[in-house]
Image (cartoon, helix red, strand yellow):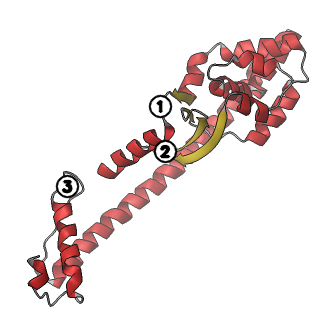
């Protein structure tokens, strides 16, 4: 009410003054992200902005350099893993074991994926059934798939949301078309070969848990809380 009777020469529309000062007051009373800088002359603003832009530009250069290093490191590790797989396969002389080893490499993503989304279901029964990835998703009550920026991380997450709004968080984005093609190939194998491959991959369940995580809480509430945390930081 007091502001309505004051004339501010620097504010073009007098009626907006109250909103401007309410916003400033809102910022001042925040516990975080409330930086306020006072300037006595135009040159102070120029110097402040130059420092801000310089810091931002330096940060962008650092992030770009880090991203390139991560890409090079990933390419190197991928090549090394390929060489290790080839070496291991050549050391296996037993035909059945070699087929299992090849299957463990080829169908690892498929079996990891089904094992992760099969909440309250038996993943082995799903993998041995004459079905499809689409039907497995439906049977596991996956009603929605959401890809979102990672929380507090530069990577991206994929969320497989169940009908009850609980969800599975994945560190990787699995192409469902590729998984379905893998599954069609997998179904052509003999029953004992499929079982051996599944056992070999699922033996290390800790690895699957590192890539996937089941949250027994509402997805919308979870994302709302995480977004609020990010805005406060």
Image quarter hosting the N terminus: bottom left
Q: Which mark is residue 30?
A: 3
State if disc 1 and disc 2 touch (CB < 8 Å): no
Mark toward the viewer: 2 or 3: 3
Distance from the alpha carbon under mark 2 to that under mark 1: 18 Å
Classify 26 as above or below 78.
below
Residue 185 placed where, x, y %? 87, 29
- Could you classify mark 2 by the number of other residues whose Cα lies within 10 Å: few (under 14), some (14-19), or many (20 or more)? few
Residue under the image location 19 percent in, 80 percent down: 17
In 3D space, how far apart are the residues under numbered discs 3 and 1 (Cα atoms)? 29 Å
Q: Quadrant of residue 52?
A: bottom left
Marker disc for residue 150? 2
- SS under mark 3: loop
Locate residue 76, reporting x and y percent: 62, 39
Determine the CA span between mark 2 and mark 3.
26 Å
Front position in the image: 114 or 85: 114
């Amino acid at each position: 009410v007091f502001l309505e009777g004051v004339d501010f020469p620097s504010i073009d529309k007098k009626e907006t003054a109250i909103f401007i000062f309410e916003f400033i007051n809102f910022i001042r009373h925040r516990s975080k992200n409330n930086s306020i800088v006072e300037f006595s002359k135009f040159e102070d603003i120029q110097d402040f902005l130059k420092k801000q832009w310089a810091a931002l530009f330096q940060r962008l250069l650092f992030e770009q350099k880090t991203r390139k290093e991560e890409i090079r490191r990933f390419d190197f590790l991928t090549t090394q893993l390929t060489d290790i797989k080839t070496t291991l396969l050549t050391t296996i002389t037993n035909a059945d074991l070699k087929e299992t080893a090849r299957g463990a490499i080829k169908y690892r993503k498929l079996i990891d994926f089904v094992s992760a989304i099969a909440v309250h279901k038996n993943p082995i029964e799903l993998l041995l059934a004459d079905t499809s990835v689409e039907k497995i998703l439906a049977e596991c009550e996956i009603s929605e798939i959401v890809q979102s920026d990672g929380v507090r991380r530069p990577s991206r997450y994929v969320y497989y949301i169940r009908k009850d709004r609980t969800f599975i968080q994945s560190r990787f984005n699995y192409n469902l078309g590729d998984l379905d093609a893998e599954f069609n190939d997998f179904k052509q194998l003999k029953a004992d070969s499929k079982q051996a491959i599944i056992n070999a991959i699922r033996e290390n369940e800790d690895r699957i848990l590192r890539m996937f995580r089941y949250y027994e809480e509402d997805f919308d509430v979870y994302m709302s809380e995480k977004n609020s945390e990010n805005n406060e930081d």
